[in-house]
Image (cartoon, rainbow, N blue to C red):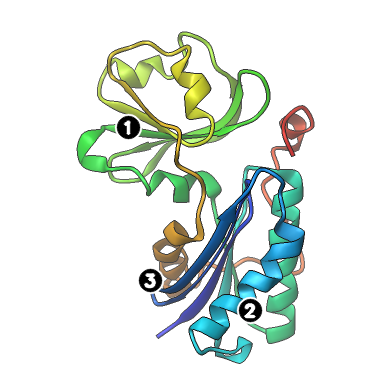
């Protein structure tokens, strides 16, 4: 049995879950446009542990969303996770933000899943997954044009999901594209991924771990 605390702060959603293995015990989150993570995150952590009748000493690991995303949001989440791991002497697990977003897709209705986070103007952070949630194209920052992701839409149903999906839909017109702009990164989808890494002992070096900022791009984007 493993008790894992999951922290998601890569976007405007401040999201915390505590799970037993991959089963969520308590989830608490608040999606506001003002990035209130610095005020809410530690309060949410205490709330979920209290509601689960757990203490910090019951935790076996802490998982954190590693990005890409907001520089400030990622820094707050990773700093909290590293601090707790140091204090409790437990492993740190990192979960790719776009991968956990992809798991919100209904795979029976698509062949390709493309989670997209909004950057600035027509820029997004994106990755491409197949219907088995295997990543088939690297994570990168890109400017959306009429030809973006066309190689996937030509061969199968292609779902774009996340805060960047709305502006993608204004440009991408192939009939195989579908869009879900109400999807946001959440600690809910982190649970299965963090437990899988825990089982395989895929841990980060707490001293040296840094978020995946995409720094060369994020300086132009939203924080």
The earlier-in-sequence mark between 2 and 3 is 3
Residue sitting at x 26%, y 33%: 110
Q: Tell me where residue 89 sits by quadrant.
A: bottom right
Between disc 2 and disc 3, the foreground one is: 2
Q: Is 165 placed left or right of 16 in the picture?
A: left
From this view, report whether residue 222 is shown above or below residue 189. Answer: above
- Kind of element beneath mark 2: helix
Crowding at dot 2, Cα within 10 Å, few <14 / some 14-19 / many 20+, comes out as: some
From this view, report whether residue 197 is shown above or below residue 150. Answer: below
The earlier-in-sequence mark between 2 and 1 is 2
Residue sitting at x 39%, y 77%: 21
Which image quadrant: the N terminus?
A: bottom left
Q: Tell me where residue 15 sits by quadrant.
A: bottom right
Residue 99 horizontal/vertical position (percent) = 46, 47
Q: Which residue matches tag 2? A: 46
Q: Is 75 placed left or right of 180 in the picture?
A: right
Q: Which residue matches tag 1? A: 112
The Cα–Cα distance between marks 2 and 3, rounded to whole angstroms, is 20 Å
Q: Which residue matches tag 3? A: 22
The Cα–Cα distance between marks 2 and 1, rounded to whole angstroms, is 38 Å
Residue 161 horizontal/vertical position (percent) = 43, 35
The earlier-in-sequence mark between 3 and 1 is 3
Residue 182 horizontal/vertical position (percent) = 45, 38
Residue found farthest to the left: 108
């Amino acid at each position: 049995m493993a008790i894992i605390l999951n922290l998601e702060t890569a976007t405007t959603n401040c999201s915390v879950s505590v799970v037993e293995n991959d089963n969520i015990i308590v989830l608490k989150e608040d999606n506001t446009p003002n990035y209130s993570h610095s005020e809410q995150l530690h309060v949410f952590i205490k709330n979920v542990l209290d509601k689960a009748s757990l203490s910090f000493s019951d935790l076996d690991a802490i998982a954190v969303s590693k990005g890409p995303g907001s520089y400030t949001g990622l820094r707050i989440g990773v700093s909290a996770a590293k601090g707790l791991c140091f204090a409790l002497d437990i492993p740190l697990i990192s979960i790719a933000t776009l991968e956990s977003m992809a798991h919100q897709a209904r795979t029976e209705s698509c062949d390709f899943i493309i989670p997209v986070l909004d950057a600035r103007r027509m820029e997004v952070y994106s990755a491409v997954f197949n219907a088995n949630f295997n990543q088939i194209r690297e994570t990168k920052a890109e400017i959306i044009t009429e030809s973006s992701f066309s190689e996937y839409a030509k061969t199968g149903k292609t779902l774009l999901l996340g805060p960047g999906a709305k502006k993608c839909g204004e440009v991408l017109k192939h009939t195989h594209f579908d869009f879900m702009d109400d999807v946001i990164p959440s600690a809910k989808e982190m649970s299965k991924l963090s437990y899988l890494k825990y089982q395989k002992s895929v841990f980060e070096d707490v001293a040296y771990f840094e978020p995946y900022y995409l720094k060369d791009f994020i300086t132009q984007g939203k924080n």
